[in-house]
Image (cartoon, coloured by chain):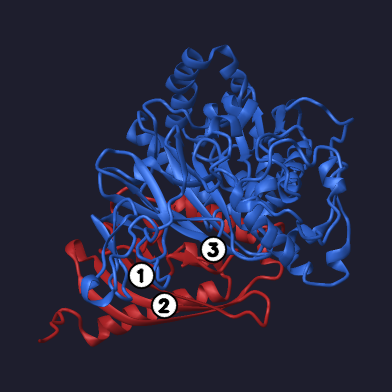
Chain colours: A blue, B red
Amino acid sequence: MRGLGGAVTLSAMNAQPNPPALPIELEALLHERGALDPQVYVDPQIHALERERVFGRSWLLLAHESHLPGAGSFVTATMGEDPVVVTRGDDGTIVAFLNQCRHRGVPICRLDEGRARSFTCSYHGWTYDSRGQLVTIPNEARLFRCPVDRAAYSAVRVPRIESRHGLVFGCWDPLAPTLEEWLGEARLYFDLAFDRPGGSEALPGISRRVVAADWKFGAEQFATDNFHAPFTHASAFAALRAAMPPEATTPDIDTLRKPLMQMSSTRGHGMGFADDRKVAEGFGKLGPHIHAWLFGPRIEYLTAKYGAEAREIFPIHMNFFPNTGALYPFELRAWQPRGPGRMEVWSWLLVDRAAPDEVKRELRIQHQRAFGVAGMAELDDTYNWVEAQRVLSGFRASRSRFNAELGTTEPDPRELVIERAPSEAGGRRFFRRWAEMLVGETTRGGAA
Amino acid sequence: MTVQTSPLVTPALQHEIEQFLYAEAALLDERRFDAWLALFTPDVDYRVPAARELDAPDDPQAPRLMHFEDDLTGLRLRVGRLASKAAWTEQPPPMTRRAVTNVRVTPGDDGELEVRSYFLLYHVRRAPAVDLLAGTRRDTLRRAGAGLQIRRRIVWLDQGTIVINPLSVLF
């Protein structure tokens, strides 16, 4: 197979000299042929491999820095299905470690967030400091033959942590590329989505929900799919048309008719975006204060920093491989796998720190109304994914072949491709990257 | 210890408010959404905060992530969506039954009434899966003619992670 068995070997943790035979044929995904085997959503062996090879080696969203406001603050998060504690130390740096006592494995932190100098296991009282170092064991001198090795039995540290524009990422693979290399040529698109005037902040709280569908349904949709909107969200649009006085604040469906562009990367990232000036008109009804901010101070800040190109890239929907999704300008989310065919969606509300309170208020209201857990658009997306997953519990249904040919062209050697939407190139390249990691190729790059 | 109840809350007032909440629950279960919408004042403030697992409960007034944060326009939009023939989550609609209990009334300022109640939502979208969701509502009711209307509602769901998805119900 092309691109396999590259020069760089697997990291030590994941090295498997003889990888097990895969339960599905990945050729179509690896070559972006536009056919999708739905076993990717259901097969337990695929899921197990995915945990190890995708989530064990990728940069994963852990938190937003504003949820770690000072020394001693912490949040709990998950990397794939591994629970971690993310803390800010006295020196301001952020670390993360497995939320697991090294004696009998009980979690050492049970809260979503807070402040703590230490974490004590409820089982036998082993206590860890805010960097996960094992500090004290009750009656250690009396109960143990010798001092327990602190270095060997501290909480397992996440070896790689990086922040970019307030988003905190972690990675288990010590050999993984830097976050910047991971983003590759899609870096500019990431920056334009998350670099905000005054920095970004996440409102207090995370919205979390269990969705009985595989995480890849969400990740792939956010990377590539805007063409579902007129069908899936017909009810939301109908309600907006019927109920809204012209001057009221509502997301504007006309935005969807503007020329949309698709960014896709061989590193698995995808984004739908449009020209700023074309979006400006359509976003008029999102809210007068939002509009004045987005197309005033925000774009002035971005063009000063990134040049005139920033005006051509107004991000709309996106997914950064593997599971960091976003809907501009308000939402950041992580698709968290929870066993085959099941995920949790975690979402943060992002605002520009420098924006006036009224802008933040409008963003908050528009976000929950459209994409919150009961959001008018979110409901119908969720139902599509849940229903598709339910059908896949059938034997024959799970052996169908799905079409992913929309916008198929000759294979493009470039890492980053920009084309007119609609195109499923972002989805094909998401699955290509996913398949590459699954068959054990290097974590180094996208294109071979 | 003792529990103080206001002498201003007569059995008749308690009965009136309970009947109001029962009738409201029936409107939702019977999917009479326009009638439900008419129970809210024009300046209604309707919120469902996203709960967190914390040492202490949050201040519901602080800016924070909400599942719902609506004025009458927002509620009208949600009801409009539910009524659309293209509301895929309603084809077929989930079967729901709302039990409202533990109604506690406190007379407030300006003749307004602070009403706390519990609810238990029984929800079936596709048998055999049966979902339950409990919560507390804190309502501010206002006299409107011979009846009552809801001026403010804060709903605290007893789920830090929402399990019923899609959650196409109103509270």
Viewer-proximal residue among B150 and B70 = B70
Residue A353 vertical placement versus B20 (above, below)? above
Q: Residue at x 78, y 39 (%)?
A: A424
Whether tag 1 and tag 2 are in contact, CB under 8 A, the answer is yes
Point out the frontmost of discs 1 and 3: 1
Q: Is residue A113 left or right of residue A116?
A: right
Q: Residue at x 26, y 43 (%)?
A: A70
Co-location on one chain, circles 3 and 2: yes
Residue A277: quarter of image? top right
Q: Residue at x 34, y 71 (%)?
A: B146
Q: Residue A292 in the image: x percent, y percent?
A: 45, 25
SS at mark 2 in the image: strand
Q: CA distance from mark 3 to mark 2?
A: 21 Å
Residue B121 vertical placement versus B57 (above, below)? below
Q: Label 1, on which residue? A: B137
Callout 1: 10 Å neighbours few (<14), some, many (20+)?
many
Whether tag 1 and tag 3 are in contact, CB under 8 A, the answer is no
Q: Label 2, on which residue? A: B119
Q: CA distance from mark 1 to mark 3?
A: 21 Å
Which chain letter goes with mark 3? B
Q: Label 3, on which residue? A: B34
